[in-house]
Image (spheres, coloured by chain):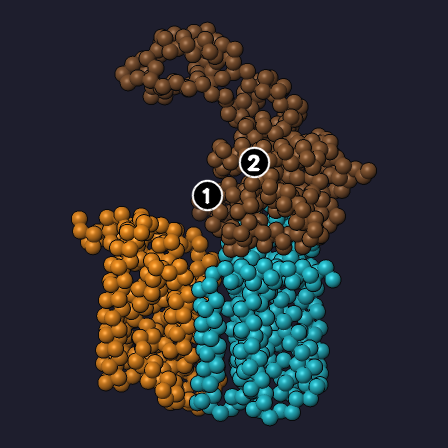
Amino acid sequence: MAESRIRVRGLSKTYHVPERESGLVASLKSLVRRTYRDVEAVRDISFTVEAGEMVGFIGPNGAGKTTTLKMLSGLLHPTGGEAHVLGFVPWERKPEYLQQISMVLGNKSQMMWDIPPLDSFLVLGEIYHVAPGDLKHTLDELVELLEMQDLLTKPVRNLSLGERMKCELVAGLLHRPRVLFLDEPTLGLDISMQSRLRRFLAEYNRRSGVTAILTSHYMADVVALCPRVILIHRGQLLYDGELNGLAQRLAPFKLIRISLRDGSVGYDEDMSLPQGVDLVERENGRLTLRVSRAKAPSITAHLLNTLPVADLSVEDPPIEAVIDQIYQGGNV
Amino acid sequence: MRYLKLVGSFARASAQNELAYRANFWISLLHSGLEFATGLLGVVVLFGQVEMIRGWSLLSALALLGVYLLIGALRNLFIGPSLDALAGMDGEIWSGRFDFTLLRPVDAQFLASFRYWQPLALIDLTLGMGVLGVAVILLRQSLSPIHVATFVVALSAGVTILYAILLALTALVLWSPGFFFTWVFDALFQMARYPVGLYPGWLRLVLTWVVPVGIMTTVPAQALTGELSVEMLAGSVALAVTLFVGASALFRFGLRRYASASS
Amino acid sequence: MSRWLNHRGGWALIRRTWLSWMQHRSFFFLLAFMWMIPPLVSLFVWSTAAGGATVGGINRGEFVAYYLVLILVNQLTYSQTNWTVGDVIRSGGMNTILLRPMSPIYDALASEIAGKVVYMVFVVPVSGILALILHPELHVTPRNGLAFVPALVLAWALRFFWGYWLALLAFWATRADALLSMQDSLTFLLAGQVAPTALLPGVMRQVATALPFRYMVGFPVEVLTGQLDGPELWTGYAFQTGWLLVAVILFLAVWRAGVTRYSAVGG
């Protein structure tokens, strides 16, 4: 069988951005001589994804996840390195390659606005050369999995964001691609819709064996769907491996957010926190504390007893905090 | 072949899109009628005051108006809507949805040019043909098959030039999104409403060589009135081919640049 | 402070609007360019028709002058705010405007004034250059010059309020901008763009004199270029003020009805 993997070696993308300073003098200067700045969006990334795998790209906004995905789908030319997807070089944009891949973007729609989704699907079926019988079969399957029978005949502009996202997924899968790129697919959706879409993606991956790369800055997406994650930060690949390993290694702590009752200890320096508790932030009677996972329950109890607590919550640290922690701490 | 089937599919989906708003249909109808009346009355009022201007009479000017309406209708039928979807207000290039177009296993230029149709432009097409037909009959020109054939060739050349110019202007948006280059041309195209001979010399040169708006309408009209020289016809065909090739190259060049520079 | 007298607020709004529009001046210059072309086409065509002689008593230079003045007057009276009214209503932005301690008119006035200044930055120099190339013949008598100003102001007011009440129909119908588009077409036809009103044939001329469109653009131009004698001038003013009254009444009525419906139905 032909090559069915995604192989990336040393991929890089640097942008040449013209510098724009504010002020009249700077504007005039820029007429005569343009200065440029190099922005390294992606730096020397290497990894391999086997057929049927579902890999999560995580990292804060602007880390280079979307840029990498765009290079793998052929939309961007890299400035260095190489990549092969299904045996093709993506940015050569051969029709045979494009026929087998698909990209779903979380915040952009590929549907025609005023007609029912079904009609858009029919046009896409034509574009992707899908035989009418196959198209019907695939649509039936997808529509059933996504529970969207009644949406097919409503004009797209009348659909909610979640319903539109379901349509985007159908549009992206109706030609049965072998590789699927998902860029922030759950962006802006409410919790119940997010989990429904995650269940769909997991099931679809199981049934069809599609190879998928999913980018997200929601930890929850990745936890639900991707046994393997790749952490990208500032264009560099910082971690590639099992999700369990990442969570344990990088986020061995929890954040405790406390609101103190008015007029209490708030502004005092002397807080006498127990051992192993770090004060992350303090503002107007609201405290954020960092505590190791293991100790979190006992510390929480202790705090409730010793401090005039009005409100308390225990949270997982956001990815950004985890990553900043890595960055300060050095390598993974 | 496959591409023809695709065009059929696009046209069908666009027709549905158009008809989604019922009020749209009547408003567009009214609009077409008003545009038509304005154009017609302009010529009628002008030639109501003067019989002949630089060799053009009411009827020959009407024939030219007919050609203008025809070409305008063809533009509005698919060239305009398709390219506008890329380069117009809220266009794909501006909003980032162009990525989807680039992901398709179909030639991007083909998609960009044939994707969206406005079937209601067929009304303008009929009106244009009507005016043209009436003017030609009243001119009592005997229309030999040769006349008609040269007319079709000249018209095709004119439409191709129009397409090439709009495509090139659309390509410019790939470098500088945010400025609606195609609007510049649409404004200048209005000058093709009247025979090029009616404009002062310097403007005539501009409208023939710089922005060949004059060629688009005047040449096909002359084909019907029998005043078209073979050189002029050959020239306009050559220009059409050259501009088409150049514009397509520019568009592809722009796509490469877009793929290197966008984020 | 009375909603109608909040001048300071008004000036601040105008200045802010102007500054933000200048940021996008290439877009507005493009619009101004687009609006200049139809009068220019008429300019060329009529001046060629006149040739060395006259058409309808107007010679080549006078045609040039007429249309150059028309370009300026058209730009000054064009009310682009009307186009945004529909959007504002649909998007719920009306809430913001209705809540402000200033009459909503200030909002419209602010964008009108700001817009005109931005457009003029383009149109005035370009018209100047065209004048240098094309040699217009314009003799402005003191009487015509004085009479021009009120005619111009009234023309703007008429075009503004007429367009506004049409645009307010967006409170009821979703595609009111189609009506505005029709107003533009009718203005083009009957307001002195296709041809100076005097040159329109028989019935058309009578219709054009009776309808409001001439008084939005053509009338001030005819005043300045001296095409009207005494009685015609006063009749013109009468028609202009009459139509303006009608427009304002329609505007107030539709506004009141619209706001009532808007708050009843929910923004």
Kind of element beneath mark 1: loop
Identity of the residue drawn at 62% across and 42% down: A142
Task: Return the mark for residue A197.
Answer: 2
Residue A194 lies, in percent from the top left, at: 52, 34
Say whether disc 2 or disc 1 marks the residue closer to the N-terminus: 1
- Give whichever of B125, C147 is nearer the camera: B125
Task: Return the mark for residue B55.
Answer: none
- Give whichever of B169, C126 is nearer the camera: B169
Chain C shade: orange
Disc 2 from disc 1: Cα separation: 44 Å
Label 2 or label 1, whichever lies nearer to me, is: 2
Q: Which chain is cyan?
A: B
Q: Residue lying farthest left?
A: C1
Report the side of A14 relative to C225 (left or right).
Answer: right
- Chain of the residue that carries numbered disc 1 in the rendered image: A
> Image height check: is C176 above or below C16?
below
* CA neighbours of label 2 inside 10 A, class few (<14), some (14 to 19), many (20+): many
- Chain of the residue that carries numbered disc 2 in the rendered image: A
Identity of the residue drawn at 47% across and 71% down: B29
* Quadrant of the image containing the N terminus of chain B: bottom right
Identity of the residue drawn at 52% across and 43% down: A163
Kind of element beneath mark 2: helix
Amino acid tagged 1: Ser
* CA neighbours of label 1 inside 10 A, class few (<14), some (14 to 19), many (20+): few
Residue A83 lies, in percent from the top left, at: 73, 37
Chain A shade: brown
Residue B60 lies, in percent from the top left, at: 56, 87
Identity of the residue drawn at 46% across and 90% down: B50
